[in-house]
Image (spheres, grey):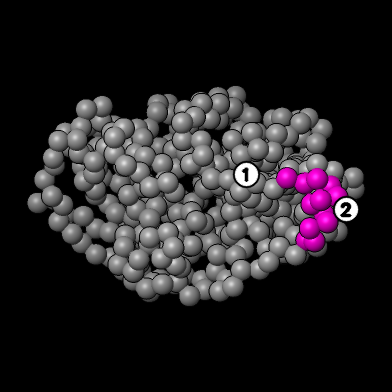
């Protein structure tokens, strides 16, 4: 019998997750059936959305469940057509080092996840990018920005959580489209990276700079597009600076995930009515059927040097909770992953 290790939710998160909220368990895996594969994890993903999964049963994450997450895995045994041994796959199997799973187009997939997908040829690029710029974070930035916000050359785009996995991609795509880009991040080092390496026109440390003052300085005529990764008071301030017919996309709410009670959006409705603002909540799952289209363009921009990436890589199965907690504290630059 093949054995697998998995990291499970030991208890509900109360505020910031702690190491004792997790435990490692071992289980025996069943023999393969037709249509199944056995895969060994190579990289785990750690993402902000996992915080909400461990804080409530609303999304089906119960105490004792394997922590929900994406992983890149190598197929080591297969009885499924189209999934050959040696190929790599991205799937939402959680923090477990070995998995036996059904694969293929007829396997049902929860709406909050994408189905298992073979990793396309990345050339010399690291496999971990299929969890980052060439994976869910890339799609989460690409389609919502271009199809929901529809930025035009010369417009002002504000990105919060700008040094994270999604925000750093969004800002660079806006630059490619000829926009003026303003980013907010949580440290001076991140601000320096956004400005000096990624080319943001303006970047500010929201912990040491008043958001409204910064926007008056960097965007005196207002903001056309707001890509919101954080929610909370910062979003209220940015929205108050939106221009007529401004567009707002909400992807995440990392400032709220550790709070026992969510803050309210206190911008008065007249702000939306008078300026005819549009606000849309988005998830990458909306574009499942166009995944290859988005990844192909993102990969092309990367090859052309127009799209840069940065990863924060932790090492070792046992360090996954630590990497997750650090990501929620904002310790990562770009995408946070764990290499097994």
Up the image or down, 39 lies above or below 209; here it is above
Question: Is 35 left, or right, of 193 in this rendering?
Answer: left
For the point 31% across and 60% down, the residue is: 66
Checking the image for residue 168, the label placed there is 1
Q: Is residue 154 above or below residue 316?
A: above
Identify which residue is drawn at 65% across, 33% down: 146
Q: Along the horizontal axis of the image, is 267 left or right of 91?
A: right
Residue 3: image quadrant is bottom left
Q: Is residue 271 magenta?
A: yes
Q: Nearer the viewer, residue 178 or 56?
A: 56
Q: Is residue 54 visible?
A: no
Spot the residue most to the right: 220
- Residue bearing the label numbered 2: 216
Marks 1 and 2, the one that precedes in the sequence: 1
Vertical side of 175 occupied by 214: above or below: below
* Magenta stretch in the rendered image: 267-278
Determine crowd level at label 1: few under 14, some 14-19, many 20+ residues with C-alpha closer than 10 A.
many
Front residue of 250/76: it is 250
The foreground one among 318 and 218 is 218
The image position of residue 314, as x and y in percent, is 43, 54
Q: How far from the left and from the top, in percent, is residue 288? A: 46, 35
Query: Residue 323 location, x and y as percent?
Result: 45, 59
- Disc nearest the viewer among 1 and 2: 2
Q: Identify the image quadrant of residue 316.
A: bottom left
- Residue at image position (38%, 55%) is 68
């Amino acid at each position: 019998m093949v054995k697998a290790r998995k990291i499970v939710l030991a208890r509900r998160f109360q505020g910031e997750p702690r190491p004792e909220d997790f435990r490692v368990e071992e289980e025996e895996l069943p023999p393969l059936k037709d249509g199944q594969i056995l895969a060994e994890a190579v990289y785990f993903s750690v993402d902000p959305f996992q915080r909400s999964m461990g804080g409530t049963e609303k999304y089906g994450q119960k105490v004792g469940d394997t922590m929900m997450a994406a992983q890149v895995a190598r197929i080591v045994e297969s009885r499924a057509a189209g999934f050959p041994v040696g190929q790599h796959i991205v799937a939402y199997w959680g923090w477990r080092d070995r998995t036996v799973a059904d694969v293929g187009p007829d396997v049902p997939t929860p709406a909050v996840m994408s189905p298992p997908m073979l990793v396309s040829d990345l050339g010399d690029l690291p496999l971990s990018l299929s969890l980052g710029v060439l994976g869910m974070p890339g799609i989460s930035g690409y389609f919502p920005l271009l199809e929901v916000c529809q930025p035009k050359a010369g417009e002002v785009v504000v990105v919060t959580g700008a040094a994270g996995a999604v925000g750093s991609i969004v800002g660079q795509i806006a630059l490619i489209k000829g926009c003026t880009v303003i980013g907010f991040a949580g440290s001076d080092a991140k601000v320096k990276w956004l400005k000096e390496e990624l080319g943001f026109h303006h970047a500010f440390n929201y912990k040491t700079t008043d958001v409204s003052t910064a926007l008056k300085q960097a965007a005196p005529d207002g903001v056309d597009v707001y890509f919101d990764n954080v929610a909370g008071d910062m979003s209220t301030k940015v929205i108050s600076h939106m221009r007529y017919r401004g567009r707002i996309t909400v992807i995440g709410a990392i400032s709220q995930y550790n709070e026992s009670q969510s803050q309210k959006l206190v911008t008065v409705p007249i702000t939306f009515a008078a300026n005819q603002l549009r606000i849309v909540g988005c998830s990458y799952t909306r574009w499942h059927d166009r995944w290859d289209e988005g990844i192909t363009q993102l990969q092309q921009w990367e090859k052309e040097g127009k799209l840069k990436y940065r990863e924060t890589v932790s090492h070792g199965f046992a360090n996954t909770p630590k990497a997750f907690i650090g990501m929620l504290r904002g310790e990562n630059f770009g995408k946070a992953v764990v290499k097994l």
